[in-house]
Amino acid sequence: MMDKPKRSHIEIPEELDSVVRAAISEGRVLRRRKKIIGILKKTGAVAAALLICVISLLNLSPAFAKAAYRVPVLGELCRIVTFNEYHFEDKIKYIDAKIPQIENTGKSDLEKRVNLEIRKAINECIAENEEAAKEYYKAFVETGGKPEDFIPIGITVDYTIKCINERYVSFVVSQYETAFSAYNHELYYNIDLEDGKMLTLKDWYGNDYKQIVAGSIENTIANWSAEQKEMLWEDLSVIELISENTDFYINQENQIVVVFSRYEAAYGAAGALEFTIQTAGD
C-alpha cells in the first residue's frame, strides 16, 4: 500500500512573492480591458479573477510559470518534471540537457533512488560523449584540419513520458550525439508505484516471460513484408534477446512495448525496433 503524501503544508517557492509583484505591474495594461469585467460578471468574481491573474502571470513572467509549475496540486498523480535544464558550449561541443525527476509518488525512498540513478546515468553518458568529442577534435586537427573550421559536436539529453497512471509510471531518457550514433543511449524507467520498485519483464509476465514475449514478437514478424524481414539478422534468435534487462516501456493502454536498439536485431538501416506485446488475453 502506498505511503500517503503529506499535504497539510504546501511549500511556496521563495521567488514567488517578488515574481507576483513584478508580473502584476506588467499586467496593468491587461486590467484595462473591458472584457475582464464581463468575464467576472458571467463566471463569478473570485473564480474568474483567479483564472485571469494566473493566466496573465504565466504569460508575462517565465519565472512565475516555473515557480507555479512546481507547486503541488492536491489529488494529482505522480508526475515527471524537469529537475534541471541547461546549455553549455565551447569550441568542440555544445550540450543541451533536460534532466527529469519523478515526484509525488508518496514514496520518498523510491523517488530518491530513481532520481539519483537518472542523474548518475545522464552524467556518465555526457562524460562519455565529451570524451568522444575531444578525441574527434584531436583527430581532426592532427589530420590537417583547422581548429576554426571544426564543427562542435552536439550532445542532447531529453526525456519522453510514455505512461502515468495510479499504478505505473513509464518514461524514457534519451541522449543523442550528432557525430556518432554509437554514443546514443536510451534509458528506460518503468516503475510500479504500488510495490515501489522498478519493473522487469519477469515481474510483468511471470516466469514464462521469455516465451511469452518472444512468441508475440515472432508472430508480429511473421506478418511483416519480405522487405522488412530482409532487414533482420539471418541468424536472429528472438528468445535469446529477451532477458530481465531487455529494454521496454509501458504505453498508454498499459501494454508492454519491447525495444531492440539499433543493430541488436537488424541492420543499422532498420534503426531501433519496437514490438507491442500481445498475449492470449489481449
Image: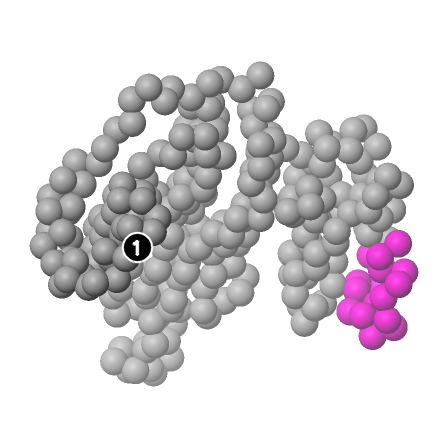
**Where 267 falls versus 11 (above or below)?**
below
- 175 left or right of 65 in image: right
Q: Position of residue 149 (x, y in %)?
A: 30, 82
For image coordinates 26% across by 29% down, the residue present is 11
Q: Is residue 51 visible?
A: no
| Depth check, front residue: 167 or 49 | 49
Q: Position of residue 53 (x, y in %)?
A: 23, 49
Q: Which residues are magenta?
A: 219-236
Q: Which residue is mark 1?
A: 39
Question: The N terminus is located in which quarter?
Answer: top right
Question: Which quadrant of the view contains residue 230?
Answer: bottom right
**Circle 1 SS class:** helix
Asked whether residue 163 is drawn in magenta, I would say: no
- 146 left or right of 32 in image: right
- 270 left or right of 147 in image: right
For image coordinates 38% across by 34% down, the residue present is 73
Which residue type carries mark 1?
Answer: Ile
Question: Which quadrant of the view contains residue 101?
Answer: top left
For image coordinates 55% across by 24% down, the residue present is 196
- 5 left or right of 195 in image: left
For image coordinates 79% across by 63% down, the residue present is 233
Question: The C terminus is located in which quarter?
Answer: top right
Q: Position of residue 235 (x, y in %)?
A: 84, 59
How many residues crowd around disc 1 within 10 Å: few (fewer than 14), some, or many (20 or more)?
some
Q: Position of residue 14 (x, y in %)?
A: 16, 36
Q: How many marks?
A: 1
Which colour style is shown?
one colour
Q: Is residue 242 visible?
A: yes
